[in-house]
Image (cartoon, rainbow, N blue to C red):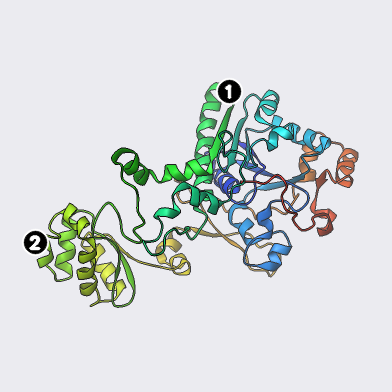
Amino acid sequence: MSLPLSGIRVLDLSNVLAGPFCGYHLARLGAEVIKIENPNGGDLARRLGADPERAERLQGLSFVAVNAGKQSIALDLKSQPGKEVFLRLVSEADVVLENFRPKVMERLGLDFDILSKRNPRLVYCAISGFGQSGPWSGRPAYDQIVQGLSGAMSVTGDAATAPLRTGFPISDTIAGLTAAFAIAAALVEQRHTKRGRFIDVSLLEATIAAMGWVVSNHLNAGVEPQPMGNENFTAAPSGTFRTATGPLNIAANEQKQYQTLCDLIGRQDLKSDPRFAKREARKLNRASLTEELNAALNSRPAEEWEALLNAAGVPAGCVLTVPQILQQPHVLDRNFVERLPAERAGEPSLRVTRPGFLLDEEFPVPSRPPTLGADTERWLARLGYTAQEAEQLISSGVVGTPRQGEAHFPQVRAATDGAA
């Protein structure tokens, strides 16, 4: 199978989530993604996740989630020999991806202006908390900080619980997808023009952009968004309701869907009630309508209502846990969860999720997330270093390889430059 990004080489200097999530999507689409990692522990995510033993082996489950199918070169970019190795790699690359704070690559002498002289076709993507310019550009940023600053937390939860962060790092995730989209677009241009491109991805801006409807209501109608919990601000009844066995999401956003809902629950009177008869009236009287619906829905289990409503064209779905959704026949049928090749004999294979789309051919199963420095020696040879030169780089600590043992990869130190 020839995937859409086959033949594209990406040098991924990023850590933790936003950049690696971007690189994971590029890798699953066929790009050759090479992680460039600090020999002193590599990507911080190698030490993160719910399995302490794996984290000690620098294969933490957080790292596993977004790094399958990649290669790893352990390289000290602060040393001059390390910079030279990297520049040779850049000469053969299509993309450089990083998520350091702004100016870090410039201080290393490896910024876009320098690298593009080496390779004019280079697409360079920098992911940071607030972008490469502006008063906040130098601030440290993590997902929760950005969630709070973006306004996302202010509209998550309800009047009693807001502000709340989402249950997963949504700003990092959105920024990673934004970066992957921008890189793919720049690669299309690169093929036609042979020119490179600098891409400046901001976690803050990517998050605000994803809040498009909420932001547009404020910019163009002067509405200050409010936290509405599980309610949908665009329509009613559209939210989470109570049944005999638990919560059920119902989205009767259209007039016909609302009328069908009333028929199914045996409350035809709600169709003509002046408080609920029209769309805008239902929004104004949302709380009263929800009370009436909850009382009627309490007569059946959530699963029965789900089947009944969907069959009649009213969107509805139970509120599932992560374990529950991953075991649903629909998810299993589409092979969304994939098993990686086992790392050790007799050890259970790890599982990862594929991207949220299918191609007209099946995705190949990716290789396991790489051991730190797994591909260092192979790439040194490919870049023209002799065996003696490679050994000198290894012995001096400029590069790292797995054969040096875990002693060469001590516990991750606190990052001095910081990453988004």
Q: Amino acid at mark 1?
A: Lys
Q: Is residue 122 left or right of residue 82?
A: left
Front-most of residues 4 and 403? 403
Front-most of residues 35 and 366? 35
Q: Is residue 361 left or right of residue 92?
A: left
Assign a secondary structure to mark 2: helix
Residue 38 percent location from the top left of the image? 75, 47
Residue 406 percent location from the top left of the image? 81, 59
Residue 91 shows in the view: yes
Instruction: Tell me the residue at 37%/61% (across/down).
Output: 158
Instruction: Tell me the residue at 88%/40% (across/down).
Output: 387
The numbered dot on residue 260 is none
Residue 60 percent location from the top left of the image? 66, 61
What is the quadrant of residue 26 in the picture? top right
* Residue tagged 1: 194
Front-most of residues 417 and 200? 417
Q: What is the total number of numbered labels drawn onto the structure image?
A: 2
Front-most of residues 190 and 206? 206
* Residue tagged 2: 272
